[in-house]
Image (spheres, helix red, strand yellow):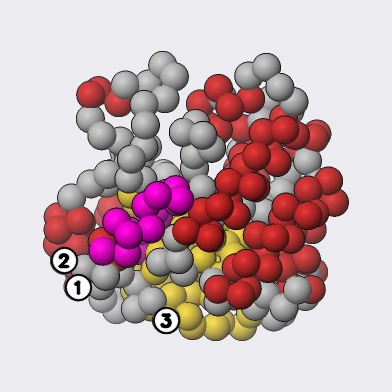
Amino acid sequence: MTGGILCDSHVHTEFSTDSEAAVRSMLNAAAGRGLESVCITDHMDLDFPPQDGQDFDGKQPFCFDLDEYFQTLSMLREEYRGRLEVRIGIEIGLQPHLGHRYREMLHSYPFDYVIGSVHLIRGLDPYYGKLFEGRPDAEAYREAFEETVRCLNAVNDFDSLGHLDYVVRYGKHQGEEYSYRKFADEIDEVLKKLISMGKGLEMNTGGLRCGLGFCNPHPDVMKRYRELGGEIVTIGADAHRPEHMAYEFQQASEILKACGFRYYTEYRERTPVFRRIDFE
């Protein structure tokens, strides 16, 4: 069940360094879950540095050939026409110095949707653990939110901010040192900046899959975004395998309704489309 959410807007395939899923396998899974559309958003993290213990086989990670990407996805869009609307998106890794490079790249290709995500804090991806060594989780969380503000001040060529509290997924104790109230000043600065920029906030169900017990961001953050006047909410499962597609979308729908939202947002040709949440 998808709770009336009919598009998964955060999906990774074999074009992403961290996925081996064939594109067709993801599209077939989306159709099987009853989705009307899916947006493929493979990772493009320019200047992603080596991580502790990871050499990525000597290749530049989280980069891929955009011409090949568009050729493949455009072909599949035609193949699945009438069964599933295939949209072409991308997830860019925000870093303050990359504003100009992303602007050039994104204006050179006809993307439907761009997720802007913060994956690096001082060059460290929380996924690999080094960010948390020798200090409390809360200190790393605060630094991640502060880095998010710096990124938003420097990069504005994206549509929605991906998994705002992504860093909490990989803390030593995950949610034990985290709450909206504990980081209200930093999170409010992020939310207000997004609203002033006209950008959306993603609700990412990957947090549920990773054992957090909540989506990214936490429902209290979503509620605060709504209180501040935020209206653009995109939904994605952060799927890297077919079984992740539309993960817990029914629960995501219920959370959004409880937070006061009546619509979620999809993007087509970089333009927001508001879809009413199923209230049955």
Residue at the spot 78% in from the left edge and 48% down from the top edge: 183
Helix, strand or loop at disc 3? strand
Residue at the spot 60% in from the left edge and 68% down from the top edge: 194
The residue identified by callout 1 is: 78
In this orientation, which residue lies closer to the viewer: 189 or 220? Answer: 189
Few, some or many residues within 10 Å of mark 3 (<14, 14–19, 20+): few
The residue identified by callout 3 is: 271
Residue 224: quadrant of the picture: bottom right
The kind of residue on which mark 1 rests is Glu
In the displayed structure, 143 sits above or below 262; it is above
Q: Position of residue 116 (x, y in %)?
A: 46, 58
Q: What range of the chain is rendered magenta?
A: 89-104
Q: Position of residue 111 (x, y in %)?
A: 30, 69
- Asked if the residue at tag 2 contacts the one at tag 1, i.e. Cβ–Cβ closer than 8 Å, the answer is yes
User: Can you tell which of label 2 and label 3 is closer to the viewer?
Assistant: 3
The kind of residue on which mark 3 rests is Thr
Residue 113 falls within the magenta-colored stretch: no
Q: Where is residue 104 in the image (x, y as percent from the top left)?
A: 26, 64
